[in-house]
Image (cartoon, rainbow, N blue to C red):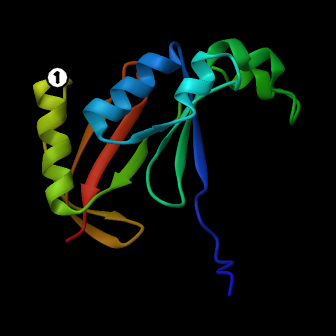
Amino acid sequence: MTDNTTRLDHVVLWVGDPVASADFYEKAVGLRPLRLTEFSAGEVSFPSVRVNDETIIDLMPHSMAPGMKMVPGAADSAGHPVNHVCLALPGEEFDALHGRLEERAVPVSEFSYDSYGARGKARRSFYFRDPDGNVFEARHYD
């Protein structure tokens, strides 16, 4: 049986250097790169990183902006800021992410407590930026 409930499939981030971004998301955030070899070989337009079995983040190079023609004005979205993307993790993975970011001298915010999200109140959360300035929130509910 197919589960047809609505889910978040992917988020597309504009990045300056997709290979460097994939490296950051793999080593600092702990996400597995996808299609990186194919991107480096010129076989695909952009790489991605896997958030979970159902969700990925596409790392779209700014150079692709002129080709964005799916709706009028789509090319103008290159560099358009999104407020933030939130990653919900189990408590141990949340702590590990915080540690990896600190090891790499990535600035992180103070912890917030009991902030509201998709599953109710999150026990703890914090914010950080990727190398392209995209803001992420990390949280855990358990």
Question: Residue 42 or 98: which is nearer the viewer?
Answer: 42
Location of the C terminus by quadrant is: bottom left
Q: Is residue 132 visible?
A: no
Which residue lies at the image location 52% right of the left edge and 13% below the top edge? 16
Judge left or right: residue 104 versus residue 33.
left
Q: Which residue is drawn at 39% across and 49% down?
A: 86
Asked whether, in this view, residue 104 is left or right of residue 4, the answer is: left
Residue 14 visible, this angle:
yes
Q: Is residue 53 above or below residue 137?
A: below
> Residue at left 34%, top 26%?
24
Amino acid tagged 1: Arg
Seen in the image, is 127 located left or right of residue 113? right
The percent coordinates of residue 26 (x first, y second) are 35, 34
Neighbourhood count class around disc 1 (C-alpha, 10 Å): few under 14, some 14–19, many 20 upward: few
Horizontal side, residue 120 vs residue 8: left or right: left
Task: Name the residue tied to disc 1.
Answer: 104
Residue 82 position within the rendered picture, expressed as x and y whole percent measured from the top left:
52, 35
